Amino acid sequence: MPPLDGNGGAGAAGDHSHDVVIDVGGATTSSCVVCMEPLEWAAIGPCGHGDVCAGCALHIRVFQNNRRRCICRAPCRVVVVTSHGAIVAAAAAGGGWPAVSSRLPMSRTRRGGYSRREGRVGEYWYHTGMGAFFDDERQYAAAKAAARLGPPPCGDANENPPPPPPPPPTTTTTRTRTGVSNSDGQGSLLTQREKMEALVFILVVVVILVVMAFV
């Protein structure tokens, strides 16, 4: 999955029937183990695995509501999203998660827990829905925006365009001797000209009858 600042983040259903389980041992890869995109920003948890990109971590933790690592299946309530280079350097120094999480803000109310207040917390930005600390504000803002948009539809909209809207209903009008009739069979009143013609015809008939009566 592409990085979040490259329009990353996709979605799926809220169950775990499509979870991805990958065993990469203790190795640190240069690409995301889920989407195989080059790793620039990655999420690392207490298990020490940091081989899932920020976009796939958002996909799994927000849209699938799954807080287990897709590599080792370990429960992971909190992750840190940081540069992949920082994760590699920490792993090379033998620090791993302790080194990455050493500066996370601690909660004043939770004994031994981290401060999980949305937004800026110490040197980090915390995303409540994802349960993730970001050390880069732009990545945090991108994750919030992607979470608000929700999972995009499956497939490419250009490959399967929506069907065109149905044409508007047409109304046909037919001219009759008694007026104008539309397609639903309901006729309109006589036109003004037809009224005058009918009135003249009646007057002529009356005159003829009167004349014949006096002859």
Image: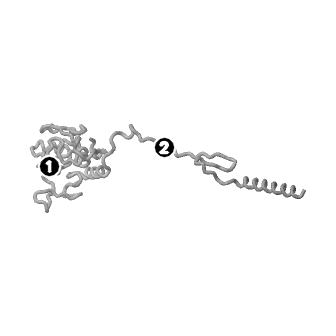
Label at residue 176: none
Task: Decide if residue 176 is on the left or right side of residue 102.
Answer: right
For the point 68% across and 50% down, which residue is it? 178
Check the picture and name the quadrant holding the C terminus: bottom right
Foreground: 24 or 202?
A: 202
Q: Secondary structure at mark 2?
A: loop
Q: Quadrant of residue 118?
A: bottom left
Residue where numbered disc 1 is placed: 100
> Is there any visible trace of residue 89 in the rendered image?
no
Q: Amino acid at mark 1?
A: Val
Instruction: Tell me the distance, in whole angstroms, between the alpha carbons under discs 1 and 2.
Output: 57 Å
Q: Earlier in the sequence, mark 1 or mark 2?
A: 1
Please identify the residue farthest to the left as the structure is shown. 94
Q: Secondary structure at mark 1?
A: helix
The image position of residue 137, as x and y in percent, is 25, 53
For the point 10% across and 44% down, which residue is it? 93
Foreground: 75 or 134?
A: 75
Rendered position, 209 above or below 47: below
The image position of residue 84, as x and y in percent, is 19, 43
Label at residue 166: 2
Foreground: 188 or 127?
A: 188
Q: Amino acid at mark 2?
A: Pro
The 10 Å Cα crowd at callout 1, few under 14, some 14 to 19, many 20 or more, is many
The image position of residue 2, as x and y in percent, is 28, 42
